[in-house]
Amino acid sequence: MDIFFDRLFSGLTAGSLYTLIALSLVVVFRSSKTINFAQGEFALFCCFIAWWLTTKGLPIIVALIPAMLVGFLLGVVTERTLIRPVRRRSETAVLIVGLGLFTGLNGLDGWIWGPANKQFPEMLPSGDSDYFLVGGARLHYDSIGIFLIMLLVVGLLSLLFNKTSLGLRMRAVATNAESASLSGVKVGTVLSMSWGISAAISALAGILLVPVLPPNELDLSSFFSILIFASAAALFGGLDSVKGAVVGGLGLGVAESMLNGYATFLGGSLQLTVALVIIVLVLVFKPTGLFGARRVERV
Amino acid sequence: MTTQSADREPRAASEPSDAQPITPAGTTSPVRKHRRRLPFVIRRNSRSHVGLIGVGVVVGLAMVLWGGGFGQFNQGQLTRVMIYAIAIAGLNIATGYTGLVSVGHSAFFGLGAYTTGILVVRHGWSPEATIPVAFVVCFVVGLVVGLPALRIRGLYLAMVTLAFGVAFPEVIARFSDLTGGAQGLTIRRAMLRPPSWSGFSLSEKGQWLYWLCVVVLILVLIVVHNVVRSRYGLAMMAARDNEIAASASGVNLAVVKTSAFGLSGALTGVGGSLFAMYLGSLVANDSFTLLNAIALLTGLVIGGEATRFGPIIGAIAVVYIPYYTSDLGQGQAAAVLFGAALIIIVFIAPEGLTGAFFRVFRRVLTVIPVLRKPQPPAD
């Protein structure tokens, strides 16, 4: 039983991190109706900023704030200068710009900070003795911390969407950008804010994630697979649903952990293939995901 | 057809200077006259058109022969260019002509390479005999990967292919007894001996591979040209431009999309197969990653989607940009440049370099199709 709990906890930890990245995908999708392929690379860039600040002597908990601010600015500037001008042209153009950002940011990180892997400091306590036992399994403090931070972000996002004026405008744009614009909502500002918030969440997720998930170092290719997992989670829950991202993320994390533990014929090495299969199945059989709004297209 | 165009020939301006319209002197303003002089208009399949194509072929052949005399290293680079041109030409079928953006073609490239590698190393096949096998294997896998394209479009399909590309190295690692896993698969030099009928010795392996790539590239270009010009190619482009209208006009979207994806994967797989012969050692985590897929896509976008020669231009960029920038930015400059190029192309020249070139070229010289008399239906 303790092994079961062990796997459950590690699954929930990974799931919380997937949820955070999935949330950032959802925030962008709600406003721009596009998947930001460079989301993982936004996170990577901010992680490098945070890492660089820690090498200058800042504690990571302090470095988190400028990293998130850089993320926010990166999101806003990207949306305003690169995405908005091509948005109306075609979906493919946005996609290509996203891929350009993907490879460009990845190369830029390597250019500035070098391609070697970096030791990344932990923000949450993760010493060998920082745990307590639940049903014989170790529940580490950092797992609890990550889970609580995830809940906090979800709570803040819900508050933002439901209780603030910006959130109201965001929902208006998500529902119908043209009508929102006619009612005096500055759609452009809302889009930029969405991208900024999304990138800031990614930055937070990245900084939490790098020390926890393998390879436990800051690696230029860290976020390739994370993006796939998070996309699988977001698609599963429904790309425009915050609730869906949470259910999808946690579900995927736990499922992956259990599959690794019990379905040994997979050899614990086909996680991405499993994510690929999930993505395909969801898209083919239920493209709106569990909680996504049904979209109707006018012919 | 030929007789028809032959008797049109005298009027159809066989020389560019003849293309000048006959206007009564002094009746048109100079501006008007100037606009009418350019572009020169020639008819497709007219003598001057065929002549121009002939000149192009001769120039192309001369360049190929010139490259054949290069030293080992430079010739190797040219071989790489051709390998990438084949792979990008494959990607062009799906992404350029059919509009199915694929961010996972590195997987087909890798699949072709591993097909060749495994057949040569484990079963003792001669390398060139594995090319058709790689084609078939990648065609079948392409059909399967193309299946989701029936329900999924645009960004979502890109997501699926992206996941396919990211997952590929993992699958290779899983079957490590066949593929060599993380250590990679090494094809020993002696196994890549040129066949005896070719007249090349083992030490001239580079020469042999160069000419093999030339032949395969020409074949691929002809196949792509013919497919694109066929009814089937029209159906692909119709499906790209407006699915619903295409479907209403009788295009079978399911068949067109899946087989386009299959053919696309197969051609890229042929490129991968040649890549295995070129490199001699295959490591999935090195050569067939997501960044490689993005490099292929970058090449296509730079060269020009849905253009005949875009893949070659793109391949030159994909091979030589990293080569000339390897000293810059800790070896990462190529990725930054690729990223910048993708964004700049989208903003400035969405049709790519080839497309932009021909857009300017058409202002100077326009080829118009021969007018055919409408024929009554046979029945």
Image: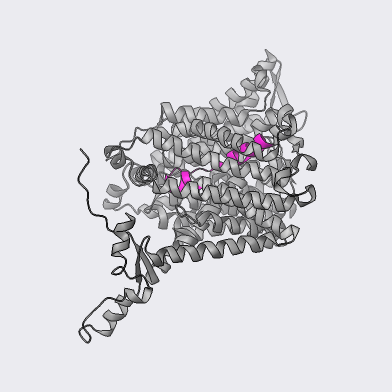
Question: If the image is split into quadrants, where does the N terminus of chain B sit?
Answer: bottom left
- Counting from the top left corner in percent of width and height, residue A195 is at 47, 49
Magenta-drawn segment: B92-116
Horizontal side of A31 relative to A263 (left or right) equals left
Front residue of A77/B60: it is B60
Q: Against B161, is A99 above or below?
A: below
**Residue found at the very far bottom of the displayed protein:** B26
- Counting from the top left corner in percent of width and height, residue B79 is at 66, 53
Residue at position x 65%, y 36% from top?
B130
**Quick check: can you spot residue B103?**
yes
Query: Which secondary structure is most common in the magenta stretch?
Result: helix
Q: Against B322, is B240 above or below?
A: above
Horizontal side of A253 relative to B18 (left or right) equals right
Front residue of A124/A282: it is A282
- Counting from the top left corner in percent of width and height, residue B297 is at 54, 49
Q: Is residue B67 magenta?
A: no
Q: Against B266, is B360 above or below?
A: below
- Counting from the top left corner in percent of width and height, residue A142 is at 67, 32
Front residue of B222/B312: it is B222
Res A225 quadrant in image: top right
